[in-house]
Amino acid sequence: MTPCMCAMRVLVQGKLCWVLSCLFAMLGFGKLVKRIANAPTLDEQKRLYDDCMIVRFVKHGPRFLVYLFCKVISFLLFNRVVLW
C-alpha cells in the first residue's frame, strides 16, 4: 500500500468518526454517552445502555424492521469507501 493510500484511508476513517459524532449529537445521544462514561458503576452503565431508544428497538422491535435497520447501518458503515 502506498503512503498516499494510507493517508486517504486515515482521512476517510477520520471523517466517518466525525460524521458519527455529529450524528450522535444531533440525535441527542451526546448526553447519553457522557452519562454512560461518567456512571459510577458498571451496573449503572448497563442500565443506561439498555434504556437507550436504539438498543430497545434492536432488542425488542419487529424482526423485519430490525433486519432492515441493521442492513442499512451495515451498508453505511461497512462499505467499500470506508473499509478499503
Image: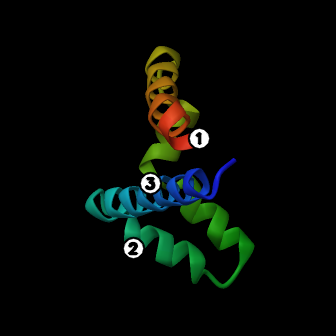
Q: Quadrant of the C terminus?
A: top right
Give the percent coordinates (x, y) of residue 70.
51, 29
Task: Report crowding for label 3: few under 14, some 14 to 19, many 20 or more residues within 10 A (C-alpha).
Answer: some
Q: Which residue is mark 3?
A: 16
User: Label 1 vs label 3: CA separation?
Assistant: 11 Å
Q: With 1 as the anchor, is 39 left or right in this view?
A: left
Q: In percent of the image, x 48 and y 28: which residue is there?
A: 75
- Quarter occupied by residue 20: bottom left
Task: Report crowding for label 1: few under 14, some 14 to 19, many 20 or more residues within 10 A (C-alpha).
Answer: few
Residue 79 visible in image: no
- Quarter occupied by residue 48: bottom right
Image colouring: rainbow
Nearer the observer: mark 3 or 2; the answer is: 3
Give the percent coordinates (x, y) of residue 72.
43, 27
Q: Residue furthest right?
A: 42
Instruction: Name which residue type carries label 3.
Output: Leu
Which one is earlier in the sequence, the residue at label 1 or at label 3? 3
User: Label 2 vs label 1: CA separation?
Assistant: 29 Å
Q: In percent of the image, x 57 and y 53: which residue is there?
A: 50
Residue 22 bears which disc, if any? Answer: none
Give the percent coordinates (x, y) of residue 80.
53, 32
User: Label 3 vs label 2: CA separation?
Assistant: 20 Å
Q: Is residue 62 depicted above or below 47 in this figure?
A: above
User: Answer yes or no: do the residues labelled 1 and 3 have beta carbons within 8 Å?
Assistant: no
Q: Which residue is mark 2?
A: 31
Q: Which residue is mark 1?
A: 83
Q: Is residue 19 depicted above or below 36 in this figure?
A: above
User: Answer yes or no: do the residues labelled 2 and 1 have beta carbons within 8 Å?
Assistant: no
